[in-house]
Image (cartoon, grey):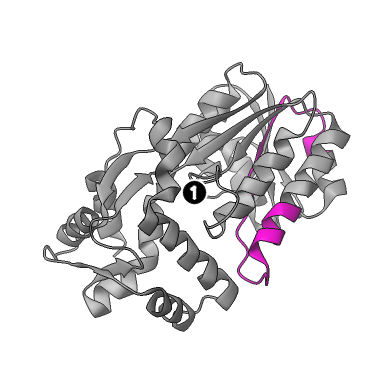
Amino acid sequence: MKITLTGSLGNISKPLAEILINAGHEVTIISSSADKVKAIEALGAQAAIGSVTDTEFLTEAFKGADVVYTMVPPSYTTTDYRTYIADTGRGYIKAIQAAGVKKVVNLSSIGAHLPNGTGPIKGLHDVEQLLNNLEGITVKHMRPAYFYFNFYGNVDMIKHANILGANYSDSAPLVMVHPTDIAIAIAEEIQSPFTGKSVRYVASDERTTGEAAKILGAAVGKPELPWVEFTDEQALGGMIQAGLSEELAKNYVEMGTAIRSGILWEDYLLNKPVLSTRKLEDFAKEFALSF
């Protein structure tokens, strides 16, 4: 098959490309950086260099593809994160229609069943709805859980404050996933027949936040590392102080409130997948190597 992937050589797209190439497929990888061309070609893929906000470029990159994998790259400068995500989705849709693509695997998120109250995820809800309105095009929405890799953003907190925390308690459940497990699941869907519009959840482990703190703490020599619950105001101030824009920080605080209330997991709990074998203890070894 001819497959076009967005996401450049990111934590999901690179292992996804490797799986597909090893399976004998013809893969094109879209990247905004010309510096990535050699690395993309070294994988055995073709590079398409341009912006996902450029519909004409996307259309050319999508032409001839049997399957397109779509994901919205993060933005650290937008002043309206939800609109940015939805607009990116609209650009994908125009290119998909113009290029005659018939099969799409879309990276969404756990919690995307909700239209509001989930921070950046509500923009992915919008993208799902936009894709679901396409006629004659098959769409699989991948809804991965909370990325293990998000913990890398807490390294300074662990090192300097000797705590791990957010605006939810140490008894709050966390459904987590390794990006490689997401890539494996996406590769399975790309290579499998499916019809209509459907959803697949992807998860690797389920723990409480307190358990997560103990497991990561033990891996970095801090076995008593506590999970500390912040107020929303404290969480917002801390993120802004750490360099996040106010817009992005507000979205993450709102996502934290969705974790605190449990609404983020509601649909997942009704449609639980088989968990992968990459548990938090396995990721903790990776985490310790880069700590």
- Residue 86 belongs to the span the image colors magenta: yes
* In-front residue for pair 151/248: 248
Going 54% across and 66% down the picture, which residue do you hit? 251
Q: Position of residue 71 (x, y in %)?
A: 63, 46
Going 58% across and 55% down the picture, which residue do you hit? 116
Going 51% across and 39% down the picture, which residue do you hit? 143
In the image, residue 218 above or below residue 92: below
* Magenta region, residue range: 60-87
Q: Using the rendered view, name the quadrant where residue 62 is placed.
A: top right
**Where, quadrant-wise, is the N terminus in this rendering?**
top right
In the image, residue 12 above or below residue 185: below
Q: Is residue 135 left or right of residue 15?
A: right
Residue 130 appears anywhere in the view: yes
Badge 1 marks a residue whose secondary structure is: loop
Q: Position of residue 157 (x, y in %)?
A: 30, 74
Q: Which residue is mark 1?
A: 11
Q: Check the image and name the residue furthest to the top.
A: 193
**Where, quadrant-wise, is the C terminus in this rendering?**
bottom left
Q: Is residue 97 left or right of residue 148?
A: right
Residue 29 appears anywhere in the view: no
Going 35% across and 60% down the picture, which residue do you hit? 151
Give the mark count: 1
Residue type, numbered disc 1? Asn
